[in-house]
Image (spheres, helix red, strand yellow):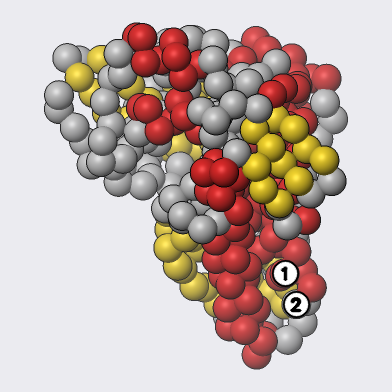
Amino acid sequence: MKKYTLIAVINLLLFTSCTGSSMEPVSSSEIFLGTSCFITIQDMKKPSEAHKALDRSFAGIDDMEQRLSVNIPESEISRINRDGRGVLSPDSLFVLEQSLIIARESDGLFDPTIGSLVSLWDIGGSEQRIPDPSEIETVLEYVDFKSLSIDGNNVSLDHNQMKLDLGGIAKGHAADLVKEELLSSGVSSAIINLGGNVHLIGSKPDGSLWRIGIQNPRDSRGEYIGILSTADKAVVTSGIYERFFEENGVHYHHILDTRTGYPVNNGLLSLTVIADDSITADGLSTALFAMGREAALQYASDHAGVDVIAIDEDDKVYLSEGIRKNFRMTGSEFHLVQ
């Protein structure tokens, strides 16, 4: 088997040059949640407090990761996975409950109990492989969010092989926590970019919209196919290029289909969700990718405040109605479907 070392790709390129602020932008980056996390403050009431606000923001990400990561043995989630039951802190319980909302809306295509299946494939990890079909069949029996029990802050798993994994929504929540911290610090304009999960605070200091380049899903170097102009929104993409390996010419990516146990194969290359909060955008980007292009566009049509950009393997780009006026194609390789 030929294995590939994953290099994290930031799938949204931000065009940030701006005017109108009395302060110089203040930026910082740290490694959390297995990716590079960038925060840039463009404007705030007390510019001298910018570095302290950034430090508090990264401390909040670290705290959340310590509670939710399946890769940290003593995290709240790891203890539940090990013991079959446990107590979640209020913030961790909130993340789990939000994941269950999306699980119900997607009929389980997004499922927080997918941990055993994720571990079996280990895509992007040191032991990634194509599991035997019998292994997949066995593990799929324990991917069922309806078999998860919550009583107050107490969580229990109905089967000892069932494992939680909130990786499909945790970065989104982390971005929301950072936004909350920055707003409380008097920040009025900022960019939060957690490995491509982008959350924008306000507009540019001069009042103009941010311009976000949407990644070309066929190019890992960060080329973009178009530019979205927006403000005060979360923008999150799920795509087949984020974590993957290839064997015998077959591409195996990390977005797993809870119905089959294999990577989702529905003709989509990537799907971007634009929403008011990042935890929603993050969870929906996975769920709607798995649901497919038509269902994703219909979901956006039915839910105010949610928009999508879908790119399929025929190099066609589909937009939900709410962002059509704010999206501009920039290359000739992909074609916008009107």
**Rendered residue at 45%/67% (across/down):** 30
**Rendered residue at 69%/37% (across/down):** 156
Q: What amino acid is labelled 1 in the image? A: Glu
User: Do the CB atoms of the residues marked 1 and 2 lie less than 8 Å apart?
Assistant: yes
* Viewer-side residue, 41 vs 174: 174
Residue 162: quarter of image: top right
Q: Is residue 218 above or below residue 59?
A: above
Residue 219 appearing in the image: no
Q: Is residue 287 above or below residue 327?
A: above
Give neighbour class at mark 2: few <14, some 14-19, many 20+ (Cα, 10 Å). some
**Rendered residue at 26%/25% (across/down):** 129
* Viewer-side residue, 118 vs 4: 118
In this figure, which residue is indicated by the disc labeled 2? 185
* Viewer-side residue, 16 vs 154: 154
Residue 109: quarter of image: top right
In this figure, which residue is indicated by the disc labeled 1? 181
Q: Position of residue 196 (x, y in %)?
A: 50, 47
Residue 153 appearing in the image: yes
Q: What amino acid is labelled 2 in the image? A: Ser
Task: Locate the C terminus and report the quarter of the image it occupies.
Answer: top right
Horizontally, is 244 left or right of 39 in the view? left
Q: Is residue 121 above or below residue 204?
A: above
| Alpha carbons under labels 1 and 2: distance apart | 6 Å
Say what secondary structure mark 2 lies in. Answer: loop
Say what secondary structure mark 1 lies in. Answer: helix
Q: Position of residue 28 (x, y in %)?
A: 49, 73
Q: Position of residue 195 (x, y in %)?
A: 47, 51
Give neighbour class at mark 1: few <14, some 14-19, many 20+ (Cα, 10 Å). some
* Viewer-side residue, 86 vs 111: 86
Task: Locate the N terminus and report the quarter of the image it occupies.
Answer: top left
Q: Position of residue 333 (x, y in %)?
A: 38, 22
**Rendered residue at 77%/69% (across/down):** 183
